[in-house]
Amino acid sequence: MESFWKYFAALFSVGLINNFSYVLIGVGAQTISSHFGQKNLMPLFQFMLVSCNIPILILNFRYLVSVNTLLRITISSFTMVGCFVVMSICVSTDGSWGFPISLIAALLMGMCQSLGECVNLGYIKAFPSEYLVGFTSGTGFAGIAGSGAWLFCRAIGLQNFEVFLIFMPLIVVYWLSFLWIYRKGKSYVNVQQYSMVQGHLGSPDPSESQSEFLTEKKSPEKSAVSSTGNEIFSIELLKKVWKRMWWLGFNLGSVYFLEYCITTGFADRATLKYSGNGSFFKENAFEIIQFCYQIGVWCSRSSLKFFKIERTWIITLLQLFNWVIWWLEAEFLFMTEWGEFILTIWVGCMGGLSYVNTGYIVLNSDIIPKEQKEASMNVSVCMNSLGILLATCFCLILDNFIMKN
């Protein structure tokens, strides 16, 4: 078997680029909306990035799990290239038409990110569950890379449309990296690796872990499995998956609801008060907050090799505490911008920990049959997307009614 680090590098690249463009639009949302004179509609970009995630994941769960995995990633890759082109055209004009078209591009980019994430997470079932850290670390680093790239491009004076054009070739690297993973997955047939890896890593006492929610015994009856290795959709499958996943999904969705309220809503309202200050850190505080948030996400998504958290509800409670502090900060601005930056790193850590440990619990569970793991990932990603979607709705209300001024 080839070195773990070869797989890590390939999965890291796929995770990084899958989320990079999504982050780039999210970080640039305040600048782009201000360019069109629509500052109070800035949360619409985050709304569009996630608004169709649940329908696309349901479509994947219901129909696409039996479609060739490489074909799904290829279609997604071509669509992302098109979105880069459309975004660059929109932000290069002052015409009012550019704003709604850029929102449509954000919508398509979000759909591609969500589909790519779910397909990749599902395909990792072909490998030992510890390989998940490569992909999750890549998705976490995408935040640092995307927000850092936007800040760097602004610092050297690049125009907004140039930012989207220069990063478009990354999609080619994305597709080639996945092609390598896809071929390795097809030849990786030693299923016993799963039990070997679990024994090597060690697992907490299941009687004291969140895997209590995954206790349904495997049915002795054979279910219909497609050529992709995924069980074909049925109502019975949906019931089984939901029964196992609702609690994990609820906690994941709650953590992301709370953190997107912070990074999209409270951070926007707080940093607008710095406008006109003249300091680089205050003038770019929103983008720097996004960068700090992504540092926390990356660190925590890379933590799987060092520690694991079975009780993800603890993370949810900690994130709720962060949410309360940030609401007070948006109202009263009692911290310096540096206090906001440090607190946001911690907020990102909570989101990354919830994400990576939920994924690990699913992939490492021997209660969930291998052919149902992508469907289980679909449910968790759906709940994640629902949390973000509800957060963007909350932020639109916050920006236009609660903290309009």
Image (cartoon, rainbow, N blue to C red):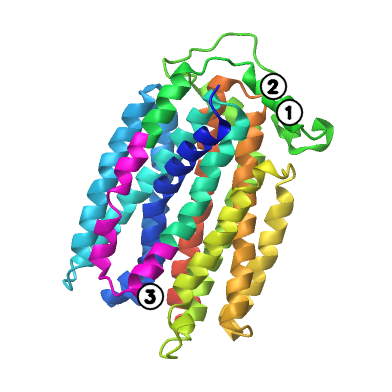
Label 3 sits on residue: 40
Dot 2, crowdedness within 10 Å: few (<14), some or many (≥20)? few
Alpha carbon distance from label 2 to label 1: 6 Å
User: Taking 366 as reference, is 401 left or right?
Assistant: left
Query: Residue 101: horizontal and vertical position, in percent?
Result: 22, 59
Residues at discs 1 and 3 in contact (Cβ within 8 Å): no
Which region shows up in magenta? Answer: 148-176
Label 2 sits on residue: 196
If you read the primary sequence from the N terminus, does the residue marked by circle 2 or circle 3 appear first?
3
Query: Residue 132: horizontal and vertical position, in percent?
Result: 57, 36
Label 1 sits on residue: 200
Circle on res. 293: none
For image coordinates 70% across by 30% down, the residue present is 214
Name of the residue lying farthest toward the front: 3
Q: Which element is circle 1 on?
A: helix
Q: Is residue 74 highlighted in magenta?
A: no
Query: Residue 331: horizontal and vertical position, in percent?
Result: 58, 82
Q: Which element is circle 3 on?
A: helix
User: Taking 337 as reference, is 400 left or right?
Assistant: left
